[in-house]
Image (cartoon, coloured by chain):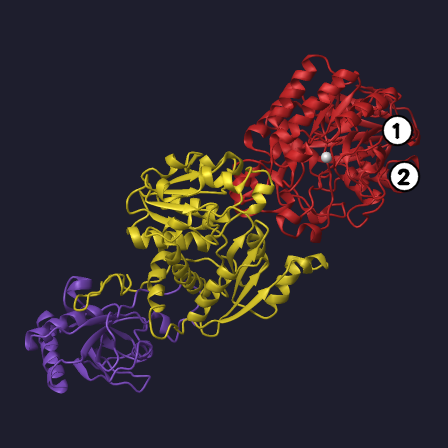
Amino acid sequence: MPVVMDADRMARSLARIAHEIVERNRGVDRLALVGVRTRGVPIAVRLAAQLKEITGQDVPVGALDITLYRDDLMHHAVGPQPLVRSTEIPFSIDDRVILLVDDVLYTGRTVRAALDELIDFGRPRAIQLVVIVDRGHRELPIKADYVGKNLPTSHAESVSVRLAETDGCDEVVIEKTSGEDEA
Amino acid sequence: MKRLLKGGHVVDPTQGIDGASDVLLDGDRVVAVGRDLAVDSGVEVIEIPDGLIVCPGFVDMHVHLRDPGQEHKETIASGTAAAAAGGFTAVACMPNTQPVNDSAAVTRSIVERAALLGVVRVYPIGAVSKGMKGESLSEIADLKGAGCVAVSDDGRPVASALLMRRALEYAGMFGIPVIDHCEEPTLKGEGVAHEGFVASMLGLRGIPAAAESIMVERDLALAEMTGTPVHLAHLSTRQSLRAMDAAKSRGLKATCEVTPHHFTLTDERLTGPTSYDTNLKMNPPLRERADVDAVLQGLRAGTVDVIATDHAPHQQDEKAVEFDRAPFGIIGLETAVPLALDRLVHRGVITFRRLVQLMSVNPSRILNLPGGSLRPGRLADVTIIAPSAAIVIDVTRSKSLSRNSPFDGWTLRGAVAATIVGGRTVFVNGEIAGLAALRAAGERG
Amino acid sequence: MSPETTPTTTGAPQADDSPIPTSRLRRKDLVGIAELTAEEISLILDTAVAMKEISSRPIKKVPALRGKTVVNLFFEASTRTRTSFEIAEKRLSADTLNIAASTSSVVKGETLADTVHNIEAMSPDLLVVRHSSSGACHFLSRICRAGVINAGDGMHEHPTQALLDAFTIRERKQRIAGLKVAICGDLLHSRVLRSNVLLLTKMGADVWLCGPPTLMPVGFERTGAHMTSSIDEAVEGADAVMMLRIQLERMLGGFFPTLREYFNVFGMTPERVRRAKPDVLVMHPGPMNRGVEISSELADGPSSVILDQVANGVAVRMAILYLLAGGAEHEAAA
Ligand SMILES: [Zn+2]
C-alpha cells in the first residue's frame, strides 16, 4: 500500500494551489469554493483558510452532494439507495467564479454531475476545477484547472485521499483492488 | 350385507365404551358392539389398523351449504363431500340460502336433493322468521314436517326480544330448538373485527364482545322464562361463556357450540405476515387471548356442548378484496377434526371421549337426530380417526368449491381415517395405511 | 440542515465520515409506520433534510428519478396529499400520472385488484395509494410488482403525514426522544393518529392522547401512549400539541352532542396552550375546522407550525420516493 503523498506533501500542494488560484484570478473577489461531498468539503475549507492567509479575505465555502445527479443512480443492481446528504450553498453563485473542489479526478462523471447541479443554482461567471489527485482514465471531456499531483494508475488500482478531518491523517495511497469505481 | 369393523379402539360415550372392540354393521344399522365378536359366514371382516379410533359418526350442526342459490360457493354435493372428508356423517345446514329456507317447499327440495346428491346426511335448519327478516315467525310446524331439525336466522340475530320469545315458545311446542346467532346489531354496527387493541391499531371497526354477550344473556333470560330449549351458536367471548356457565348451573335447557377457529386463533393473527387476510374475517370475529382461553376452559369444563364449524364457503374473488368489503366466514368441514385433535386432545384440554361427545353425541341429542351412538339398532354412521397422523392442510385439495381457509399450509397432528354413512364407506383417507379393505368395501358400496 | 438555519458563509459545512454510504431502507413498499424501525425512520428524516434544500433552489428539480413512473392512485379525494406527492415526484424528475379512481368501478363489478392490475400493465415503478378501506395498501403491496406508498388507508395509517410531522418537530426541537407530544381530537377514526403514535413512541417521545371517551380507540394504552379526557392534563408541559380534525359526521354519529360543546370541552385555544411549554409547537395535519378543534387565533399564532408541516411534506415525500425507487424492480419479494 504505497503512500504517494504524505501530510507534508499535501500541505505544500494545497498551498501551491492556493497561490495559483490567487494568481490566475487576480485576487479572490467574487470567488467561492464548493466542495464535492465527502472529501471535497474539508479540502475546500482548507483552501479557504489558505486564501485568507494570502489575501486576508474570506472566501465563502459551500458543499455539494451530487448523489441525486449521478448518472448511475437508477442503474444500480439490487440494493439500497446511495445516502443523500445536504447540498449547502449559502450564497448566490450568480456571476461568481466557482472553484469546484474534489479529492480525486478519475472518469469525470462526478464532476459532470457536480456541474449539472451547480448550474441549477444559477449562472456562475466561470467554474474552475481543483483536485488533489488526477489519476487519468477520463470518460468525459473534463480537465482540472488545479492539480495537487498527477498520478498515472491502472483500472485495477484505487486511489484514496485520506484527510485528518475524515480519516484521522493526511495521505494519499494507491491500493490494488477488485476495481471498484471511484468516479 | 354384514360388515365387521374388527380390532379397532372404539370410543362411544353413550355405551361407556373406550377400548378395543369390534363393531358389527348390518346394512345401514349397527347390530353388535363388543370384544371379539363371533364371525358368521357371509360377514365381511374389515381389520381396523392399530392406533385408529372408531367412533359414532360426527355431526356438524352448523354448516352453510349455499344450495340453493349460491352454487358457485358450494353445493349439496360438494359440501357433503367435504363433510365426508372431514369425518362428518351428517351436517345441519343453515337456512340463509336463496331463497331462504323458510318454507316446507324449500326444505323438501333440500331434503330431496340431499337424498340424491348428498354424500353424508343433510338435516335442514329452517328460518325462525319469514325471509329471515326478523319480523314474523315462519311456519315452523310445516318446516318440521318437511324435515327441519331446528330453526335459526343464523347469519343474523333474532334482533327482537319479543320475536325471540315467541320463537322459543312456539318451536318449543314441537320440541325443536331455536338456534340463535347472538349479536346485538346496533353495537355490532359496521364492525368487521373484534373490538380491541388489534382492531384499533389496524383501523378496523370493532365488534365489541358485549355485542355477543348481551344477546347471550337475553336469550338465556328468555329461555328461562319460556322453559324451552335454546341453542347458542358459535360463542366466542369469555363473557358469553360465563353467562352460559351460570345458566347451566341454574338448570336451564340451554346449549351452546364453539368453532375450531375460535379455539385456535386470536385476533393477533390479523397483524404481521397475515395482516388483513380476509380469510381471518368471520362473524363472530376472532377474539383476544383471554377469550380463546375461556373457550378452551368451556370445552374442558363442560360449559360448551358442541364443536361446530360454521362452514361458510366464499369464492376466492369475493374474498380477494379490501378487508371491510369481504364477506364474513371461512370453510371448516375438513379442518375441524385435525384442529380439535391437535389443539384440544393432544394438548390435554379434553379427552378423546369428550371430543366424541362434542362432535357426535351432543349435536345428535340437541337436534334429536338418530345418530350419535353405536348402540345396536342405531344408524351405521361411523367416523374412524387416526389420532396421531400428521397432516398438512392443503386447501387446493379441499372437496369444497371454496378455498377460504386460514389454515392452509398448517401441519396438524390428527386426521380422519374414514367415514361410513349408513354402512357405506363414503371417505377413506389415502394417506393412512391399512385401509385398503375399507376402501374396497366403499367401492363395492 | 438547510441554508436558512445555518448561514455559515465562511464556516465549514459539516463533514461526514461514512466512506460508501448507502441507505438501509430495503423494502419495496411503505405501507405503514408499524413496519419501520427507528433506524429507518431516522434515515427517511435525514434524507428529507437533504431534499428540503432542493425546494429552496432557483431550479427546484433534480434528475434523480428520471425515467421512473409514479402513479398517484387516489380512491378518495385529497387535493392536499395528492398535490404534495405530485410536487415531490416532479422535483425528483419522475413521470407522474394522477388517477382519481372512484370506488364506483367496484360497483360495476371491477375489484380493487382488477383496477390495479390494469394500471400495472402500464409498468409504473411506484404507486401512491389513497383508499377508504383500512389495509387496502397491504393488500395492494402483496399483489403489485410496483412499490406501494400508502397515502392514507381508511382509519389505519397515513405514514407520510407522521413522518412530516416528526420532521417538523425535529427541525424545530432538534430531537424527538423525550419530548412530550399531546395529540387531541377524533382519535378513533384518525389514520394520522395511528401513524403518529407508532412513530413517536418508536422514537422515544412521551405521547399523550386526548379526546372524548367515545372517540378513543379501545386498548390504545398498549402503544405506550397516555390516554386522557382532560385537555389540561394532556397539554401540561407539552413540547408539541397536535390537533386532529373533527368531522361533522361524528356529531351525527352520536360521538358527541354538538360541535359547539366539543369546542368548549376539547377545542384548543391560546388559554389552554398556556399550560404547555412556552416554545410549544402547535400542529394540525389539515384541513382545519377553525372553531371546532382549534381556534383561529391559535392556528394563525406564533406557535403554529402548520404551514411548515405543509412545506416539509414535500421534502419527506421526496425522501420516501427516492429511497423506495431504487428497490422496486429488483426486490419484489423484500
Ligand atoms: Zn352465525
Judging by the rendered image, the residue that carries numbered circle 2 is B106
The answer to whether C295 is drawn above or below residue C92 in the figure is: above
Q: Nearer the viewer, residue A169 or B192?
A: B192
Q: Identity of the amino acid at label 1? A: Ile
**Residue A8 seen by the camera:** yes
Mark 1 Cα within 10 Å, few/some/many (few <14, many 20+)?
A: many
Among the 4 quarters of the image, the one containing residue B90: top right
Among the 4 quarters of the image, the one containing residue B409: top right
Chain drawn in yellow:
C
Among the 4 quarters of the image, the one containing residue B68: top right
The reply to whether the C-beta atoms of the residues labelled 2 and 1 are less than 8 Å apart is no
Chain drawn in purple:
A
Pinpoint residue B34: horizontal percent, then vertical percent: 81, 19
Q: Identity of the amino acid at label 2? A: Val
> Which of marks 1 and 2 precedes in the sequence?
2
Which mark is on residue B140? Answer: 1
Ligand 1: give its quadrant.
Answer: top right
* Secondary element at image label 1: helix
Pinpoint residue C48: horizontal percent, then vertical percent: 36, 61
Q: Chain of mark 1?
A: B
